[in-house]
């Protein structure tokens, strides 16, 4: 098993190209199943998760080829709407096949999801939406069985859910009649999915809003080329990293509009940020002002950057508070950040951070994708050597992160544990 070794204390300088968005490409890959065809997806990040989703598509009868961040997906011969435990347990996004399976086959057999180990994320919203659309759902030996011809319905999510919004969108695409999703997620990843489904021939209104209206279309246009949006979470991670270590970095292949609240918060911290249509330049003197933060659904501060923000606030010149209102139990990184010397205290979903002068290198262990990123950032800023184990988590969400950081001057390498 690999580990990452970092000798910290070096500023980051140079340019980095941001990869395609993991959270956008995974549902779009499953959406290729809805209508048989040959699809080409560009700007696809080479990640464990995209590879896993590719294997899932192959298991149901499709073919997947991947080269130079371009993925060719052929779903013409897909004939087995089953997502087995061996794949779903490793990646919760496998659950995104539920909507496409129901749309194409009126049947789905999907194992209960797994993925990161930081707490439960119920799938109730997905199932209630499908039941409202006419599906009959049962649980058999840990597998969800959904069957029935779908019809339009009005869906009211009591809480914003990106996954449930995506699954419902895809399930409604061929349903008989009109489906309305109220309190829909409007993350850029959902907008990207809407754009893909619209190119597929879907009749969807309400793009970029919390109300989506889908008119079911029995005939769609299978097979075309599509470009995936840049990954705002990867971009935000690099921005926070520069704020921590100091230096000047330009991010390429990025959409600054997707990072509005993050950029605003980083300016409060004391960084200088300039942007244009597809690049962001950040300059940091390592002077870090304490800034409170509460995660929220888009366009609020992303929960996927909460752990990285905490690493930044640990070195602030004062105390701050971090509240995660999306996932209340997403704080497994706190124990590992404490190994670097962080002074942290947690009550319910509220973390209190007392700023310290410096981090000290330490051996730490990754617990999920974004926690892994926070540990890498802390190690980059720390005095001395750090070793980060269980880095298979980071490989699920960040493409070649150690190579990109090496290109910015970091002393980081991947070795065998």
Image (cartoon, rainbow, N blue to C red):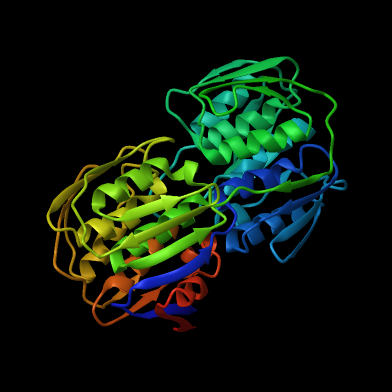
Q: Nearer the viewer, residue 272 or 36?
A: 272
Q: Is residue 220 visible?
A: yes
Residue 360 against residue 87 in the figure, above or below: below
Q: Nearer the viewer, residue 111 or 272?
A: 272
Residue 298 picture location, percent across and down = 44, 36
Residue 159 picture location, percent across and down = 42, 27
Residue 127 picture location, percent across and down = 56, 30
Q: Is residue 139 visible?
A: no
In the displayed structure image, the side of residue 86 where residue 410 appears, left or right:
left
Quadrant (top left, top right, bottom left, bottom right) of the C terminus = bottom left
Q: Nearer the viewer, residue 409 or 118?
A: 409
Residue drawn at x 26%, y 43% as measured from the top left: 293
Residue 42 picture location, percent across and down = 71, 54
Residue 69 against residue 61 in the figure, above or below: below
Residue that extends furthest to the bottom in the rendered view of this protein: 416
Residue drawn at x 28%, y 60% as measured from the top left: 311
Q: Nearer the viewer, residue 79 or 222?
A: 222
Residue drawn at x 85%, y 44% as measured from the top left: 37
Q: Quadrant of residue 98?
A: top right
In the displayed structure image, the side of residue 346 where residue 110 appears, left or right:
right
Number of residue marks: 0
In the displayed structure image, the side of residue 259 where residue 365 appears, left or right:
left
Residue drawn at x 63%, y 44% as measured from the top left: 27
In the displayed structure image, the side of residue 204 where residue 284 appears, left or right:
left
Q: Quadrant of residue 307?
A: bottom left
Residue 133 against residue 235 in the figure, above or below: above
């Amino acid at each position: 098993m690999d580990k990452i070794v970092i000798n910290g204390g070096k500023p980051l300088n140079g340019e980095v190209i941001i990869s395609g968005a993991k959270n956008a490409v995974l549902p779009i890959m499953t959406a290729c199943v809805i209508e048989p065809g040959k699809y080409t997806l560009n700007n696809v990040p080479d990640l464990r998760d995209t590879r896993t989703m590719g294997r899932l598509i192959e298991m149901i009868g499709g073919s997947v080829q991947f080269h130079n961040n371009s993925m060719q997906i052929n779903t013409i011969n897909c004939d087995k709407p089953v997502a087995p435990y061996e794949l779903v347990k490793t990646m919760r996004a496998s659950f995104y096949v539920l909507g496409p399976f129901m749309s194409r086959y009126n049947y789905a057999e999907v194992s209960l999801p797994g993925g990161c180990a930081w707490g439960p994320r119920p799938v109730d919203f997905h199932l209630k939406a499908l039941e409202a659309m006419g599906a009959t759902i049962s649980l058999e030996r840990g597998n969800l069985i959904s069957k029935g011809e779908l019809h339009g319905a009005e869906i009211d999510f009591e809480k914003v859910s990106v996954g449930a919004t995506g699954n419902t969108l895809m399930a409604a695409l061929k349903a008989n009649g009109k489906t309305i999703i109220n309190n829909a997620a409007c993350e850029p990843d959902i907008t990207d999915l809407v754009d893909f489904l619209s190119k597929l021939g879907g009749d969807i209104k309400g793009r970029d809003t919390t109300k989506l209206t889908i008119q079911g279309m029995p005939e769609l246009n299978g097979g075309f080329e599509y470009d995936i949006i840049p990954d705002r979470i990867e971009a935000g991670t690099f921005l926070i990293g520069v704020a921590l270590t100091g230096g000047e970095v330009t991010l390429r292949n990025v959409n600054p509009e997707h990072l509005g609240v993050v950029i605003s918060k980083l300016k409060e911290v004391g960084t200088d940020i300039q942007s244009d249509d597809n690049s962001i330049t950040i300059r940091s003197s390592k002077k870090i002002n304490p800034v409170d933060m509460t995660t929220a659904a888009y366009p609020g501060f992303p929960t996927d950057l909460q752990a990285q923000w905490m690493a930044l606030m640990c070195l602030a010149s004062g105390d701050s508070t971090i509240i995660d209102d999306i996932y209340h139990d997403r704080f497994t990184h706190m124990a590992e950040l404490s190994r670097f010397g962080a002074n942290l205290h947690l009550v319910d979903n509220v973390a209190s951070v007392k700023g310290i002068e410096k981090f000290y290198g330490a051996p730490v262990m990754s617990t999920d994708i974004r926690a892994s990123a926070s540990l890498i950032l802390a190690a980059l800023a720390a005095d001395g050597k750090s070793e980060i184990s269980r880095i298979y988590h980071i490989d699920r969400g960040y493409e070649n992160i150690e190579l990109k950081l090496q290109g910015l001057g970091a002393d980081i390498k991947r070795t065998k544990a």
